[in-house]
Amino acid sequence: MDPLATVASSAADLARRVAAGAAPSDWTPAEAVLAMMILVYGDPSRLGGTKVDAAGARRQHPAVVAAARATGRTDGAVVYKVMNLRSIQTDGSRGFAHGAAVDRWVVSAFGSDLDGLLTAAVLVARAVPGAADVIRGLDSPPALASLTGDHLHWVVDPSATERDAVVTARRGQGMFRARVMANYLHSCAFCGLRSRLPAQNSYLLVASHILPWAEATSHDRLDPTNGLALCAIHDRAFEWGFLSLDEDLRVVVSAGAREHYEPEERVRAEIVDLGGRAIVTTSKHFARPGGRYLEHHRQNIFDRRFRAAYRV
């Protein structure tokens, strides 16, 4: 059966089970889709409920809380399932082993099709009360809505039409941004610029696609490993090929920056002196940018795009 058809049928069954108040048993494809969404777009440092607020209560990721409420499971069960999926996705190098058949199924079906995963999550959100809050919990904060394009809560509007399948990649950029920003601790990967209140005021940072949107597949556009958190000036410098990253994630600089921009001291301080610097990767949960994306940038964009555009 087509994976999306499997998810739709499973979501209907899940909705009936939850409405009847029946206790959960084996995980279903619909529930696995929600866990997969948390794996791909949830900030790993916020999973597990280990952070404590001023009142002494543990704080859990809102998407985990929403998934537990929607499925009738505990927060811990949802986190454990996410870790099962992580183990499968990383060939056992991270996460918890002993995943079930449904875990292998969801990774196989959607691990290389994030557009399909997002569409599957929308199907679950339409059928299961509260499941839409899982998606909203993974999105960028409302204050940053203007930076992320169409917001995902429009996708899970019950009045939406079948055209959702066409526009989910664009509307999923809120989640893409949120995950990329968390991966770099809300800092520019090149210079370290960050807001003191990152969840509310990261307006000078963008989640920059390594493989440009126009050249990317729908999966690539939603893949957080195709993203770098960059300040506005370094985003543009990276986009136009004045900067790139080598295989060791160190900055490489095109001579074109010094050749075509001034004043010299500004160009040196903001671009040239970055050469050889390791990117900001202070999070213990840091996920490396995808090697194929960086290779494409080095081979096709770095020191080429601006020269081709301006015939220099």
Image: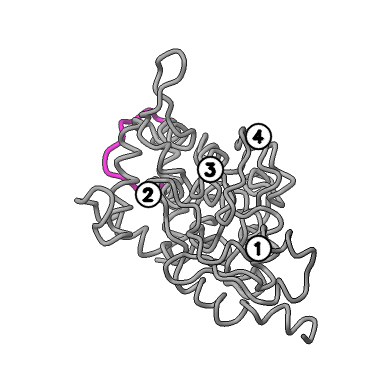
The amino acid at mark 1 is: Ile
The amino acid type of the residue labelled 4 equals Gln
Q: CA distance from mark 2 to mark 4?
A: 31 Å
* Numbered circle sitting on residue 138: 3
Q: Earlier in the sequence, mark 1 or mark 3?
A: 3
Percent position (x, y) of residue 202?
A: 66, 42
Helix, strand, or loop for circle 1?
loop
Image: 127 above or below 119:
above
Q: Residue 32, labelled with which disc?
A: 2
Disc ID at residue 271: 1
Residues in magenta? 20-30
First in residue order: circle 2 vs circle 1: 2
**Hey, which quadrant is residue 144 in on the image?**
top right
**Residue that appears at 48% across and 57% down:** 117
- Mark pair 3, 2: CA separation: 16 Å
The answer to if 27 sits in the magenta stretch is yes
Q: In the picture provided, is 233 more to the left or to the right than 51? A: right
- Tell me which numbered mark, 2 or 4, is placed earlier along the sequence: 2
Measured from the top left, where is residue 216 in percent x and y? 59, 72
Residue at position x 46%, y 49% in the image: 37
Residue 201's label in the rendered image is: none
Q: CB atoms at circles 3 and 2 under 8 Å apart?
A: no
CB atoms of marks 4 and 3 within 8 Å: no
Residue 275 vs residue 31, the one in the foreground: 275
Secondary structure predominantly adopted by residues drawn in magenta: loop
Q: Nearer the viewer, residue 110 or 90?
A: 90
Mark toward the viewer: 2 or 4:
4
